[in-house]
């Protein structure tokens, strides 16, 4: 019962904050001359960071690389454990346009805010939507704004890292911009998949790994780049858990 009451309180607080934030976002968007809506996007990410702080049982620790030039474009790639990953990653101090499933953009208020911030919808059942998403992401990179992908395409059910899709890596090589891997650990307990209840106390780790340059790579290297980035993320999670890689890598478990 306590878990249910806590979850209701947090969801109601989040809904109130979103309703208050929407007109602020509209005003900033109206006066944001940047073609990539950088200031509008940053204001929206600050909302995400505040949402992460609504739950006093969540503690976030950020470590790793410090990004000096926030307008140098990266294809940012992260693993995905929970809906809570989004507000946690929003604590990073630079703007990224998020690739998100198209259904989210149809949610009243929240979906409108995604569009105002310039985030990128994709319908995973429609190949044309995927191609349109990559074109839109490329335009952001060319305008010196990073984009972020959850490369697994969905949240992990058991905390292990699943197969990575190639789209983000194909994009990075085609645009000759670095891939910036991000690792999230401990968020699965925050909002478990297929549940709207906020879980027990969670200590979440977020680490920015060293970027991987793609200069000189050709599209034939897409698979190798994907596997390199995925291996970096798996190794970091295994290190944090003090576990063998085989217990973190869902593909290794499948191979057995």
Image (spheres, rainbow, N blue to C red):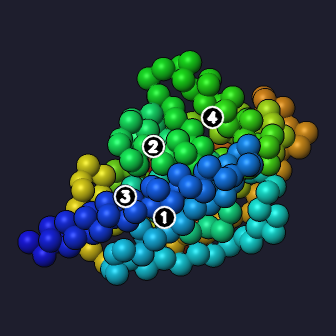
Assign a secondary structure to mark 2: helix
Assign a secondary structure to mark 4: loop
Q: Residues within 10 Å of mark 3 (few under 14, many from 20)?
A: few
Question: Residue 47 got which mark?
Answer: 1
Foreground tag (2 vs 1): 2
Assign a secondary structure to mark 3: helix
Task: Measure the C-alpha gap from mark 1 to mark 3.
Answer: 11 Å
4 or 1: tag closer to the N-terminus: 1
Residue drawn at 81 percent across, 55 percent down: 72
User: Residue 41: in sight, yes or no?
Assistant: no
2 or 3: tag closer to the N-terminus: 3
Foreground tag (1 vs 3): 3
Q: Residues within 10 Å of mark 2 (few under 14, many from 20)?
A: some
Question: Residue 166 got which mark?
Answer: 4
Task: Measure the C-alpha gap from mark 4 to mark 3.
Answer: 36 Å
Residue, disc 3? 19
Q: Specify whether 24 is left or right of 96.
A: left
4 or 2: tag closer to the N-terminus: 2
Residue, disc 2? 112
Q: Specify whether 256 is left or right of 192.
A: right
Residue drawn at 33 percent across, 80 percent down: 57
Q: Quadrant of residue 233?
A: bottom right
């Amino acid at each position: 019962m306590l878990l249910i009451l806590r979850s209701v309180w947090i969801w109601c607080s989040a809904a109130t904050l979103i309703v208050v934030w929407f007109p602020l976002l509209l005003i900033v968007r109206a006066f944001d001359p940047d073609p990539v809506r950088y200031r509008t996007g940053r204001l929206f990410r600050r909302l995400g960071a505040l949402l992460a702080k609504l739950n006093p049982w969540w503690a976030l620790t950020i470590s790793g690389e410090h990004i000096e030039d926030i307008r140098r474009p990266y294809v940012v790639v992260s693993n995905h454990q929970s809906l809570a990953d989004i507000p946690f990653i929003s604590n990073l101090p630079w703007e990224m346009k998020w690739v998100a499933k198209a259904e989210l953009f149809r949610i009243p208020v929240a979906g409108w805010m995604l569009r105002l911030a310039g985030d990128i919808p994709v319908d995973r059942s429609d190949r044309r939507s995927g191609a349109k998403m990559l074109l839109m992401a490329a335009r952001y990179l060319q305008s010196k704004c990073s984009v972020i992908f959850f490369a697994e395409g969905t949240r992990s059910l058991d905390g292990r890292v699943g197969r990575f899709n190639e789209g983000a890596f194909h994009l990075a090589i085609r645009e000759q911009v670095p891939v910036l891997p991000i690792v999230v650990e401990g968020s699965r307990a925050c909002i478990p998949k297929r549940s709207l209840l906020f879980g027990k106390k969670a200590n979440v780790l977020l680490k920015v790994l060293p970027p991987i340059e793609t200069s000189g790579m050709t599209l034939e290297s897409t698979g190798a780049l994907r596997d390199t980035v995925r291996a970096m993320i798996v190794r970091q999670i295994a290190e944090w858990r003090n576990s063998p890689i085989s217990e973190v890598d869902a593909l290794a478990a499948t191979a057995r």
